Image (spheres, grey):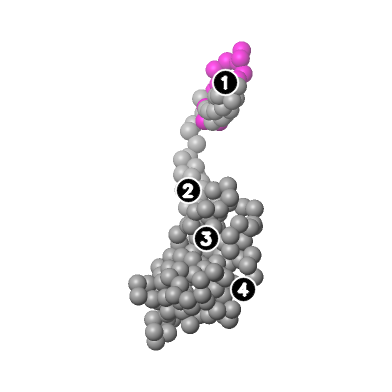
Amino acid sequence: MMIRSLQWMAWSALLIGIAGCDSAPSSSASSPGLSQPQQEAPAPTEPATAAVASATRDDREVQPASAVAPPATTPVAATASAAPVKLPDPDSSGYIEATFDDLKFDMTKTELFDRNMLTPKVNALMGKKIRIRGYIFPTLRKTGLNRIVLVRDNMECCFGPGAALFDCVLVTMAPGKTAEYTIRPVAVEGEIRLEELAGGPDGRPLAIYQMVGHEVE
């Protein structure tokens, strides 16, 4: 109620000020008790007309200066930020060379994952056929693996609770394809996508990147 009253008072003052400027009392009306002013011959209208025309002409000349378009930097910046990400060209096999650095985004280990955290490059890579190098997370089974977890390095902390979500990729091998466990770094070819793997503490995902594996070398 107080805000509405203040707004009404402000608008009223503004309107009264405008009305006062437009209808200022003449000097003859503000002098009570005086006799009728002596009639004078009307002044020549040509000088006044010329003055009005000059003022109008000046206004027309000044107006374009006040309507100058804003600097072009604003739309240019907006266009640059919205520009699509240029990915490397695929090789002769149709795969884009990628690294775990390409999948990285700003997120602390205590934050909850939000897809708005993903960088434009990460979003551009999703759905693409890539080749990425890393290590196979240790498993009890060593041969004929239908599913592996590819991690950035050979430290076991790179998967599961407390690990960075962008440091691992869950790879499900395509039908008829399997992988063999090794302690050496491997290159995985496949199609990467964004798909959260539930199962972490407090509803957190264990992984967010998944791949259909075509080859593990």
Residue furthest top in the image: 33
Indicate the amino acid at tag 2: Thr
SS class of the residue under badge 4? loop
Disc number for residue 207: 3
Q: Return the x and y of residue 177 as percentages of the image width and height.
A: 38, 76
Magenta-colored span:
20-38
Disc number for residue 153: 4
In this rendering, does residue 84 appear at all?
Answer: no
Is 27 in front, or is 42?
A: 27
Position of 123 relative to 202 (above/below): below
Indicate the amino acid at tag 3: Ala
SS class of the residue under badge 1? loop
Is 83 in front, or is 208?
A: 208
Q: What is the distance, in whole Å, between disc 3 and disc 4 at their CAs?
A: 16 Å
Circle 1 residue: 1
Residue occupying image coordinates x 58% and y 50%: 201
Q: Is residue 133 magenta?
A: no
SS class of the residue under badge 2? helix
Frontmost of labels 3 and 2 is 3
Position of 27 relative to 156 (above/below): above
In this rendering, does residue 94 appear at all?
Answer: yes
Q: Return the x and y of residue 32 as percentages of the image width and height.
A: 61, 14
Frontmost of labels 4 and 1 is 4
Disc number for residue 56: 2
Residue occupying image coordinates x 61% and y 73%: 153
